[in-house]
Image (tube, rainbow, N blue to C red):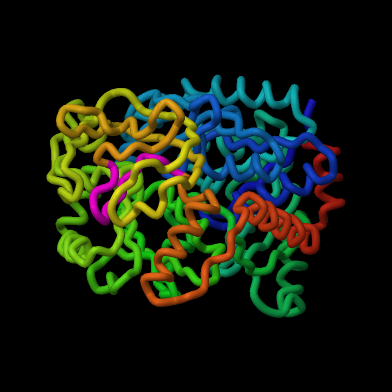
């Protein structure tokens, strides 16, 4: 049976995912077979396992930190918001259906069995399980049906580390208030972690002593404010706030329901490049490359592009001859019309950008597949990609048709991209997430943009997997230096 530790937070975006990821790397480096686990995740950034099942991106990152193959059991329930009150429900990696918040809450009890089955299965196979909570455990109006925070702690008999974000302010009130609101669960709380601290720790010391005295719970560490080039998951991710320009300026349209924006994180490894996110015409500028990213609601976000005025800027940009890439939902927006006859997302239809003469039709089947291949027979602006190998995954509703042919299947039998309406002049569309993670693909794009700007230097070829692992190691090292790891081992050994 596995030992376990759970990381909860006083609110969303306090660093639970990264702390959990770092602990996974620490335990794995110590020789323990380690698994991440999050019973219910709400995120638009997801990942496809080798067997075509969908989980939250954070658990995929945590699995990589633990040197494990990505397994659907690490995240049995995934909610993907499609609107302000509606989400697509993913159970064990497959679509269960779309539900409003009220409908999901009413039926939530049905999903606990899948969570319990997944956890019990992992419990038999692993030495250590690092469990991540969601949001705040002190949502006292929801606790009677909870299975992601204290409900999960009870199920797993998991000791809890409670993390608070001092950068937001009020961290001591948040820690104290959370524990006070959850007095009946106090035995589960075994330590506090204060995250994102900037400044002199000596000044903080009196507060640390007082919160320990008030609650009887030890502060196990104060983590400095540090940035890591590690995939972030939710809409609060700091990367989406970036609007600075670099030597090479890549602009991504920040759609209201943007998903899988981690596709573009690879460019952050190159010193010459800055990726910035724009959501209004004032910030559009004159980028060297424009990307329209994935979205969980293509029709509504296409309407946003129209209503915000961004459509004018995009069309003007297309006329300059500079490159535009659409990924997944962004690819669908490049087509002439997007139809949703079965109300799989927003229903109805909307005119697309008409930069690729094709139509997209949402169907009941969700495409989920892992793919490897290479660019082949691309003409026009993006012909420089021909021969570049890639690996990635597809995860989308809808297929794209031109001249009554399905051009969603953009691969030949060898997994090569075909030019069946995919690339037109300076426009490139793809359903494949992770396509830029190939060092060859990213380098070719950067070299092309540098050449266009008259810069003679070429980008250094980088091994993205090696760079990611270095970031994971840096994260683990930071936790080792600033957390009482020996105490955490002791907590795990004693349990609740």
Q: Quadrant of the C terminus?
A: top right
- From the viewer's perspective, is residue 55 above or below residue 183? above
Q: Residue at x 49, y 32 (%)?
A: 370
Q: From where the camera sits, is residue 102 visible?
A: no
Q: In screen coordinates, is 243 left or right of 59?
A: left
Residue stretch in magenta: 422-433
- Horizontal and vertical percent position of residue 183: 64, 45
Q: From where the camera sits, is residue 100 visible?
A: yes
- From the viewer's perspective, is residue 405 above or below residue 218? above
Q: In screen coordinates, is 143 left or right of 219?
A: left
Residue 425 counted in the magenta span: yes
Q: In the picture, residue 132 is in which quadrant?
A: top right
Residue 426 counted in the magenta span: yes
- Horizontal and vertical percent position of residue 352: 17, 47
Residue in front for this viewpoint, 236 or 370: 370
Q: In screen coordinates, is 156 left or right of 274?
A: right
Q: In screen coordinates, is 190 left or right of 233?
A: right
- Horizontal and vertical percent position of residue 450: 43, 70
* Magenta stretch secondary structure, dominant: strand
Q: Quadrant of the N terminus?
A: top right
Q: In the picture, residue 409 is in which quadrant?
A: top left
- From the viewer's perspective, is residue 180 above or below residue 457? above
Residue in front for this viewpoint, 111 or 304: 304
Q: Residue at x 75, y 22 (%)?
A: 124
């Amino acid at each position: 049976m596995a030992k376990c530790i759970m990381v909860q937070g006083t609110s969303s975006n306090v660093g639970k995912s990264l702390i959990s990821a770092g602990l996974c790397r620490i335990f794995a480096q110590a020789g323990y077979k380690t698994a991440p686990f999050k019973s219910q995740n709400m995120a638009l950034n997801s990942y496809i396992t080798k067997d075509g099942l969908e989980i939250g991106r954070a658990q995929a990152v945590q699995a990589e930190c633990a040197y494990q193959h990505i397994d659907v059991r690490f995240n049995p329930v995934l909610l993907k918001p499609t609107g302000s009150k509606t989400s697509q429900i993913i159970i064990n990696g497959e679509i269960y259906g779309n539900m409003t918040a009220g409908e999901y809450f009413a039926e939530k009890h049905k999903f606990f069995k899948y969570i319990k089955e997944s956890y019990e299965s992992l419990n038999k196979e692993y030495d250590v399980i690092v469990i991540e909570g969601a949001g705040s455990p002190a949502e006292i109006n929801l606790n009677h049906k909870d299975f992601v925070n204290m409900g999960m702690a009870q199920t797993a008999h998991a000791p809890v580390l409670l993390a608070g974000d001092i950068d937001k302010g009020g961290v001591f009130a948040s820690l104290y208030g959370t524990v006070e609101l959850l007095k009946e669960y106090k035995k589960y709380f075994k330590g506090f972690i204060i995250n994102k601290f900037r400044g002199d720790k000596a000044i903080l010391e009196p507060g640390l002593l007082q919160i320990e005295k008030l609650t009887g719970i030890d502060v196990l560490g104060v983590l400095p404010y540090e940035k890591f080039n590690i995939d972030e998951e939710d809409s609060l991710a700091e990367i989406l706030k970036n609007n600075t320009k670099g030597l090479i300026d890549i602009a991504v349209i920040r759609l209201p329901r943007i998903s899988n924006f981690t596709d573009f994180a690879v460019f952050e490894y190159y010193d010459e490049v800055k990726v910035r996110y724009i959501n209004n015409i004032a910030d559009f500028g004159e980028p060297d490359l424009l990307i329209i990213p994935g979205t969980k609601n293509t029709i509504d976000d296409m309407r946003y592009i129209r209503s915000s005025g961004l459509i004018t800027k995009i069309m003007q940009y297309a006329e300059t001859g500079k490159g535009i890439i659409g990924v997944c939902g962004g690819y669908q927006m490049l087509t002439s019309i997007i139809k949703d006859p079965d109300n799989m997302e927003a229903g109805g239809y909307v005119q697309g950008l008409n930069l690729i003469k094709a139509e997209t039709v949402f169907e009941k089947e969700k495409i989920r597949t892992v793919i490897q291949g290479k660019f082949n027979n691309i003409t026009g602006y993006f012909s420089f990609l021909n021969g570049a190998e890639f690996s990635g995954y597809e995860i989308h509703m809808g297929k794209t048709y031109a001249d009554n042919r399905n051009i969603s299947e953009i691969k030949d039998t060898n997994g090569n991209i075909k030019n069946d309406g995919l690339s037109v002049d300076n426009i490139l569309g793809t359903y494949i997430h992770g396509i830029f993670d190939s060092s060859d693909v990213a380098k070719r794009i950067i070299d092309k943009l540098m050449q266009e700007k008259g810069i003679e230097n070429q980008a250094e070829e980088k091994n993205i997997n090696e760079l990611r692992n270095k970031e994971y190691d840096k994260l683990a090292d930071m936790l080792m230096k600033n957390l009482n790891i020996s105490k955490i081992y002791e907590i795990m050994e004693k349990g609740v």
